[in-house]
Image (cartoon, rainbow, N blue to C red):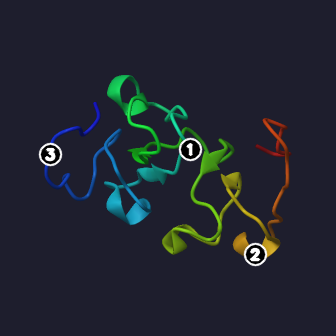
Amino acid sequence: RTFSGSGAPPNPLPECHGDCDDDTQCEGDLQCFQRKGTEEVPGCVGDALAAPSTDYCARRPSLDTVWMKGDNGNPAANFPLGLCEGDCDTDAQCQPGLVCQFRSGNEEIPGC
């Protein structure tokens, strides 16, 4: 189910609700999935796919699931990025011991 009413959404947001900007706006262990356009939100169906560029709170299936957390250092609360999290532009945007994997298209990411 996706929040689609008028006015302010509940805070923190439950699963498959948006629009979130970072993980702190999501309930419990849910994470804010930063998406581009109408990118599918893991674990969410229906209206969650209808609102372009709206970011939703979702449950990350596993740590090796590729997960969009932000871009160009925003939102700052989601950086540095962890394992299999994107979108990084430099190694400095990753947690210590991790490197930024540059790729084109849907190229595989080692370990993810």
The secondary element bearing badge 1 is classed as loop
Residue under the point 62% across and 61% down: 71
Label 1 to label 2, Cα distance in Å? 27 Å
- Please give the residue where the numbered disc 3 appears in the rendered image: 6
Left or right of residue 86: residue 101: right
Q: Position of residue 78 (x, y in %)?
A: 54, 67
Residue ID at (28%, 46%): 14
* Residue type, label 3: Ser
Residue sitting nearer the eye, 3 or 36:
36
| Residue underneath mark 2 | 96
Drawn side of residue 12 relative to residue 100, left or right: left
Instruction: Label 2, secondary structure: give it.
Output: loop
Q: Considering only order in the chain, which callout, 3 or 1, is on the residue closer to the N terminus?
A: 3
In this view, the mark in front (1 or 2): 1
In terms of sequence position, does the residue under pointer 1 or pointer 2 come before the other?
Answer: 1
The residue identified by callout 1 is 36
Q: Give the quarter of the image for residue 65.
A: top right
